[in-house]
Image (spheres, rainbow, N blue to C red):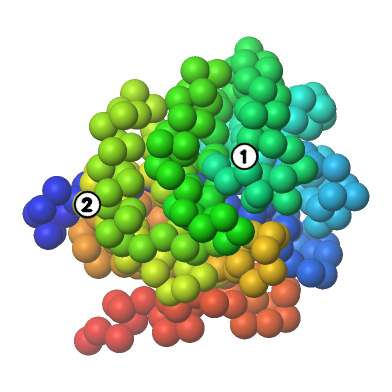
Amino acid sequence: MSDLGDGFPESIRIREVGPRDGFQNEPEIIDTAHKIELIDLLTATGLERIEITSFVRPDVIPQLSDAHDVLAGIKRREGVSFSVLIPNNRGLEIALEQSDRFDETNFFLSASETHNMKNVNRSIEDSLSHLEDTIPKARDAGKRCEGVISTSFGCPYEGDVPRENVFAIAERLIASGCDEIGFGDTTGMANPVQVRRFFEEAMSRFGDVEVTAHFHDTRGQGLANVLSALAEGVESFESSFGELGGCVVPVGATGNIASEDLISMVGEMGIETGVDLPKLLEASARAQEILGRPLGSHVLKAGPVDWHRE
């Protein structure tokens, strides 16, 4: 158990999503060489899971149009699992042309009809039907599969999203072959009480798969929500170095929780992550240089607690 001794896990797993979720939100195209440099810095930190890119149409997200070149250029490091986001069958076919360069596939849809339509121009049922066809193909290719459900804690267009709607989607994704379900607070609408109630039920319903929490700090509640999830036994989280990223719809929905903020907090609580925090901060500092602007990570600004101890 952690130092608090009240049910928190001894360790957690983190999937770093900055190279995909973070980069795709940047308005200026990042050079492929810089993307490769930053990913190589991340693989040297002890992070064991990194989302590298997505095989979306280049005209939809130009920032990720170099997916092939990024996958080809990054260094494979033992013990580090690379994942790619897959939008549809065609995206999977293209990704599998470089099957040896990644290990996991992530599939996504929203729990809100309006957000799903604005994000991928499909109804939820249409998205699910396509994923139920695509996910088994990824499994047949030997890839681990994660289903990501956006707007799990609320929609900026529709407001409340009933938990039962979210869990019904999760059940279909699991039935299709997903080994992991990620519940996303896509626009930072969750609060700690809501999160605790949500995962109390989710952990009891989906104990046979990995349950992952993905929080945003859009309204400053990201780490508080992590604490609530930890209290309910969640041991898997997604975060982004430097606090890069957010959601491309709607405008202003920025702010994945920063990986270094998450790792610093749980480390102070006695929870292991296996990540070298100073090395992670080097990667975030380099991203700051490349992007030419300050990033939102608190620990990047203030430094780890240990830096200020005698």
Q: In the figure, 242 relative to 90: above or below?
A: below
Q: Secondary structure at mark 1?
A: strand
Outermost residue toward the top in this view:
140
Vertical placement of residue 246 versus 49, above or below: below
Image coordinates of residue 205 in percent, x first then y, are 31, 29
Can residue 247 be seen from the camera position used here?
yes
Give the quadrant of the C terminus.
Answer: bottom left
- In the rendered image, is residue 179 in sight? no
Q: Which mark is residue 129?
A: none
| Separation (CA) of disc 1 from disc 2 | 27 Å
Would residue 200 appear left or right of 130 to someone viewing this image?
Answer: left
Q: Residue furthest left?
A: 5
Residue type for callout 2: Ala
Q: Residue at x 62, y 39 (%)?
A: 109
Rendering coords of residue 22 (x, y %) = 64, 60
Residue 218: % across, % down: 51, 70
Which tag, 1 or 2, sits closer to the chain's start? 1
Say whether residue 154 is left or right of residue 32.
left
* 107 versus 197 height, above or below: above
Identify residue for label 1: 109
- Residue 185 vs residue 269, the one in the foreground: 185
Q: What's under tag 1, amino acid-wise?
A: Leu
The image quadrant of residue 85 is top right
| Residue drawn at point x = 66 percent, y = 45 percent | 116
> Which residue was labeled with disc 2?
231
